[in-house]
Image (cartoon, rainbow, N blue to C red):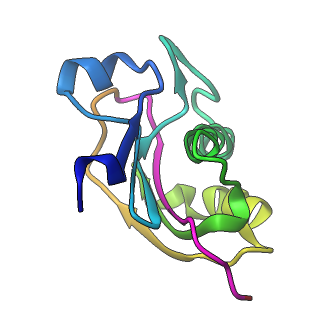
Amino acid sequence: MTSDAVRRVQSGSPWEESFGFARAVAAGDRVLVAGTTAFRGDVLHGEGDPYAQAVAAFTGALEAIGEFGLGRESVIRTRVHLAHSRDIDAVGRAHKELFDPVRPVTTFLVVEGFVDPRVLVSVEIEAFRGAVDS
């Protein structure tokens, strides 16, 4: 794979600059989106609300694949990291509302915590840039 086959986009998150990573990378027929939270700049959307944070995080991740001309119908995998197992139903509801028509493979994980303790949810998505079969 040549360097021309890889394209990176940034979202403007201060962590991307501090830690040296891209929000999304397209390589060949795949687009990978890094862990995305409900932060927009310095503002955490949905503080204390796992459902609202999940919607905001997935919205940010979908915006990242939008940079490559893709939408939710191109999503083939999601990963959801939760700070608390008690939030699985609320976050699962947000996932279903956003992805039920697409049905990507998914993994839900409970983690020890996030860089900012107010974060309840972090999501990753993987999208496919080729033809999509039902």
Instruction: Look at 70% across and 54% down and name the residue there.
Output: 71
Looking at this view, name the residue that lies furthest to the left.
Answer: 19
Above or below, 98 relative to 61:
below
Q: Quadrant of residue 57?
A: top right
On screen, residue 117 versus residue 129, left or right, reads: left
Q: Is residue 93 visible?
A: no
Across and down, in percent, residue 25 comes to 38, 47
Q: Nearer the viewer, residue 65 or 19?
A: 65
Q: Nearer the viewer, residue 117 or 129?
A: 129
Q: Which residues are magenta?
A: 117-133
Q: Is residue 67 visible?
A: yes
Across and down, in percent, residue 56 comes to 64, 37
Above or below, 103 relative to 22:
below
Q: Nearer the viewer, residue 87 or 3?
A: 3
Q: Nearer the viewer, residue 28 or 37?
A: 28
Quadrant containing the N terminus in the rendered view:
bottom left
Across and down, in percent, residue 16 comes to 31, 25
